[in-house]
C-alpha cells in the first residue's frame, strides 16, 4: 500500500504563488504524493518587470527516463503551462509510455491564454499540438479563451456567453478526450449581473454550474490553485461537481483574504492561511 501519487508537470516559480509552488502544497495537504516535473525554473513569474528563466526542455526526457528506469508509476499525470511545441511532444510521449504500464488519470490544464487572447509565447503550432494532447485526457480544465482555442472557434466579443453555448463547447472538447469530463472555468454568463463567476461542469453528458461571488480583480495563481484542489479531491474519491465546488470556494476564500491584505495582484493568493481546511 502507498499514498496516491501524481506526476505534476508545470514550471517552478520562486515568487508569485503560481504553478508548482502553489499546486504542490495544496495537493500535499490533500494527502497526495506530488512528484514535480519542471518545464522551466523562474525566479518570479512573468507578471513582474524582471525575471530569471531557465528553460528545462532539454533535460525533461532524461528526467522522465530516470523515473521510468527506477520503476516509478503514477496514479495521475497533471499538466500545466507548457512552454514550447517540443515540451508538448515530450509530455505526450510520457503520457503514452505511462499508460502502457498503468491506467493513470490524465488531467490537462491547457494554460494557453485568458480574456480572449492567447499568450504571446504560444505559437499556432503549439495550439495545434495542445489539441492533440487531449486524446488521452480524463479531465480538461480550460478557461473560456482556451476552450475556444482548443476548438478553433471565435471567442465571444464581450467575453460573455450563454450556458447553452458553453454546453456545446464542453461537449465538443469532451468528444476529443477519453474521459469526457470538462470544466470550463471562470466564466461570465449572459444571465448574470456580473456579481458571480461560474464554472461549467460537463461530466459524460451531465452538466452543472458551480458559481461563487466575484471578488476583487485577477490574481496570479488562481487557476493553478483551483486545478490543484480539483485534482486532489478527484483523486480522493470526490465526484466532479463536489470537487469543483470545493476548489471554487477555496480560491474564493483566498481571494477575499488577499483583498483584505491589499496584496498586489502578482503576489498571488495567500493560500497558506487555508491549507488546513483542505484536509
Image: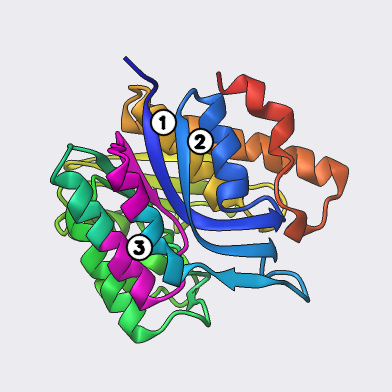
Q: Which of marks 1 and 3 is nearer the N terminus?
A: 3
Q: Residue 61 carries which label?
A: 3
> Which quarter of the rendering shows the N terminus?
top left
**Residue 102 left/right relative to 26:** left
Residue 36, horizontal then vertical, whole percent: 48, 46
Q: Distance between the residues labelled 1 and 2?
A: 6 Å
**Residue 6 left/right relative to 198:** left
Q: Quadrant of residue 96?
A: bottom left
* Mark 1 neighbour density, 10 Å: few (under 14) some (14–19) many (20 or more): many
Q: Distance between the residues labelled 3 and 2?
A: 32 Å
Q: Which mark is residue 247?
A: 2
Q: Are marks 3 and 2 in contact (CB under 8 Å)?
A: no
Residue 162 drawn above or below residue 204: below
Q: Distance between the residues labelled 1 and 3?
A: 32 Å
User: Residue beneath label 1, please?
Assistant: 243
Could you say whether the residue bearing mark 2 is in a helix, strand or loop?
helix
**Residue 139 left/right relative to 262:** left
Q: Is residue 86 rendered magenta in the image?
A: yes
Q: Earlier in the sequence, mark 3 or mark 2?
A: 3
Question: Camera-side residue: 254 or 48?
Answer: 48
* Mark 2 neighbour density, 10 Å: few (under 14) some (14–19) many (20 or more): many
Amino acid at each position: 500500500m502507498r499514498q496516491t501519487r501524481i506526476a505534476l508537470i508545470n514550471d517552478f516559480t520562486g515568487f508569485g504563488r503560481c504553478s508548482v509552488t502553489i499546486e504542490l502544497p495544496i495537493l500535499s495537504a490533500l494527502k497526495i504524493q506530488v512528484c514535480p516535473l519542471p518545464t522551466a525554473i523562474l525566479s518570479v513569474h512573468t507578471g513582474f518587470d524582471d525575471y530569471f528563466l531557465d528553460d528545462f526542455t532539454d533535460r525533461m526526457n532524461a528526467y522522465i527516463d530516470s523515473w521510468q528506469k527506477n520503476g516509478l508509476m503514477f496514479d495521475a499525470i497533471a499538466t500545466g503551462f507548457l512552454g514550447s511545441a517540443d515540451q508538448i511532444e515530450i509530455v505526450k510521449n510520457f503520457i503514452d509510455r505511462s499508460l502502457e504500464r498503468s491506467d493513470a488519470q490524465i488531467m490537462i490544464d491547457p494554460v494557453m491564454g485568458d480574456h480572449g487572447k492567447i499568450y504571446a509565447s504560444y505559437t499556432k503550432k503549439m495550439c495545434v499540438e495542445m489539441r492533440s494532447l487531449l486524446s488521452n485526457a480524463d479531465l480538461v480544465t480550460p478557461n473560456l479563451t482556451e476552450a475556444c482555442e482548443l476548438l478553433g472557434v471565435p471567442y465571444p466579443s464581450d467575453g460573455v456567453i450563454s450556458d447553452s453555448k458553453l454546453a456545446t463547447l464542453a461537449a465538443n472538447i469532451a468528444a476529443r478526450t477519453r474521459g469526457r469530463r470538462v470544466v470550463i472555468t471562470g466564466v461570465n454568463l449572459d444571465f448574470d449581473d456580473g456579481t458571480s463567476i461560474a464554472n461549467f461542469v460537463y461530466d459524460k453528458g451531465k452538466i452543472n454550474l458551480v458559481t461563487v461571488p466575484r471578488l476583487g480583480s485577477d490574481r496570479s495563481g488562481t487557476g493553478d490553485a483551483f486545478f490543484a484542489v480539483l485534482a486532489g479531491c478527484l483523486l480522493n474519491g470526490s465526484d466532479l461537481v463536489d470537487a469543483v465546488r470545493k476548489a471554487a470556494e477555496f480560491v474564493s476564500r483566498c481571494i477575499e483574504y488577499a483583498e483584505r491584505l491589499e496584496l498586489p495582484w502578482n503576489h498571488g493568493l495567500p493560500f497558506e492561511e487555508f491549507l488546513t481546511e483542505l484536509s
